[in-house]
Every structure is written in C-alpha cells, then in structure tokens.
Image (cartoon, grey):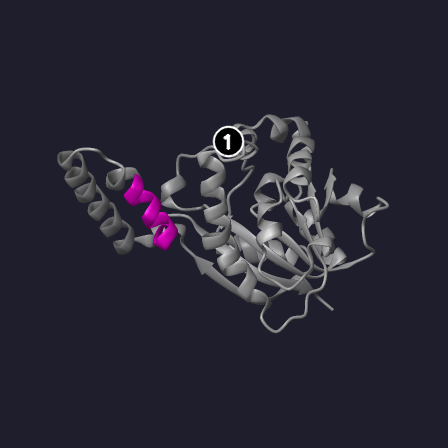
Amino acid sequence: MNFKDYYNEHEDYIALRKKGSAFEKQYYREVDFWKNKYLVPLLDGHEIQTICEVGCAVGILLNRFGTQVPMNKRYGVDISSSNIEYAKELFPEMNFFAGRLSDFLVSTGAPPKVDLVILSDILEHVEDDSGLLQEAGDYGKLVVLNLPMEKCEENKDRVYGIEDKHGHLRSYDLADARQLVESAGMEEVACTVKHYVQEPIFREYLADKLFNNKETTEEKLGGIAKYLNEINEIDLNPSFYKSNYYALLRKKV
C-alpha cells in the first residue's frame, strides 16, 4: 500500500489543506479543545525544549501545543508530501519533513534526540503500531500518545482496514492500548481516558448541527428535542461510544 499517495489524496486531508474551510476551522477547535486539552497537562513538571510530532498532518497541533518550546525547536514528520508542503506555508518557522520517522532520523535536519515525541491519532493508521511506538520511545526522552479506543458498541459493524473511511487499520480498547505500550518496551508515567461525546466541544457541535443553525422555530424546537434525547442517551451509557487514551510514556529501563 502506498500510504504517501493515500494520504495525499484522502478527502479529509484535502479539506484540511483548504485555508478557511469549515473542516479546517473545526480541526483547529478539536486540536485546542480536545487533543491538546489532554495531551499538554500530562507534561506538568517535565522540562521540554525540543518536540517532534510524527503524523503531524499540516502542523496545527504541533504549532498550538501549549509549551514554552520555541517554534524553531519543533519538528513535524508526515508521510504525505502534500500535507508537509502546506505545513511549510502555514508555519515557516517550524521544521517539517515528508516521509517516515525512520527516514527523518537519518536526514541532515533531524536532531540526534528530542525531549518529546507526539503521537496523536497516528498508531491506528500504521501497519506496525508497536514498531513505531518503540521507535518514538528510542528517539524521545518522553512520548505523549493519543490513541482512539474504538472497540465499543458504537463501532461494532465498522470494518477496519485501508478501506475504512478514516484509514484506521485496527481498533483498540484500554487493554489493547496498555498491551501496545508494553510490547513497545514503554511504561506509563501518567494517563487519562476521555470520551469525546462528553466534551463541551462535541455538545457545541451537536447543538449547531441540530438546532443552532436552523432557520424556523419549528426546526429549532425539533432539533432541541433531538439534542436532549441524544445527550441523555450518551450520559446514561458513555461506554457505548469510543473514548481516547491519553498517556505520557517513557522507555523502560
């Protein structure tokens, strides 16, 4: 499988590379109020001076990662050359590389080691998830991991693999996530598990979809009823829906 071509041409990333698009605006919100909301606090008490994000897409998460690391000490790696070209236009002060992490590590632009490697929503896309996590652990003193856990009733009929609409090759639950960490020779320093459907950002999105943007009073009232019913179902059974495993990891000694 040519993953470079796949992600160059994937509809999600084409939409993300359209400046000012609705998809891009929503992605910025998810970075700030979902991904970095839980990744950044994991680093409390740790001094970070250099960062490398693997699977950085167009560099938005890396750019907005809320630490004191200067932009010129942030490195982004992505298999998609189209993503990287766009990232360089958006954030010229940061460092980007098109290719795999293994290719980046032998390039002239790679620092010998970094304080932190970010793996956010990436391991489910790669063939050798354990191998990439191990490689990240060798390269970074610490690794922050955001892994979707989609082994749940919500996704019981989803067919994983390269034909999956988001390119997820497999699904995980919490036991799988911790087994993955173990198999890569890593250990947890800190972690948290969160359900996206319980987050304010999801509820704002759902409200906009169901009633905020409706034109007539009848549509708004109907949408509010649907919204309240869906939120009630979520709150009664959050485990029906996917969650995310946010973890700070380090290499076992």
Q: In the rendered view, does 249 fall on the left or right side of 166?
A: right
Amino acid type of the residue tagged 1 in the rendering: Asp
| Image location of residue 128, percent across then percent down | 67, 42
Task: Locate residue 8: give its quadrant.
Answer: top right
Q: In the rendered view, does 9 fall on the left or right side of 226?
A: right
Task: Identify whether 44 is placed above or below 183.
Answer: below
Q: Judge whether residue 199 is colored magenta.
A: yes
Q: In the rendered view, does 39 fall on the left or right side of 84?
A: left
Residue displayed at 43% across by 57% down: 194
Q: Nearer the viewer, residue 97 or 192?
A: 97
Q: Judge whether residue 41 is colored magenta.
A: no
Label 1 crowd (10 A; few <14 / some 14-19 / many >=20): few
Residue displayed at 52% across by 28% down: 11
Q: Secondary structure at mark 1?
A: loop
Q: Which residue is mark 1?
A: 164
| Image location of residue 74, percent across then percent down | 70, 53
Q: Main secondary structure of the magenta part?
A: helix
The magenta segment: 197-208
Tag count: 1
Q: In the rendered view, does 51 fall on the left or right side of 240?
A: right
| Image location of residue 201, percent across then percent down | 38, 51
Residue displayed at 79% across by 41% down: 103
Task: Locate residue 225: give its quadrant.
Answer: top left
- Give the residue at the far left of this rendering: 218
Residue 1: in sight, yes or no? Answer: no
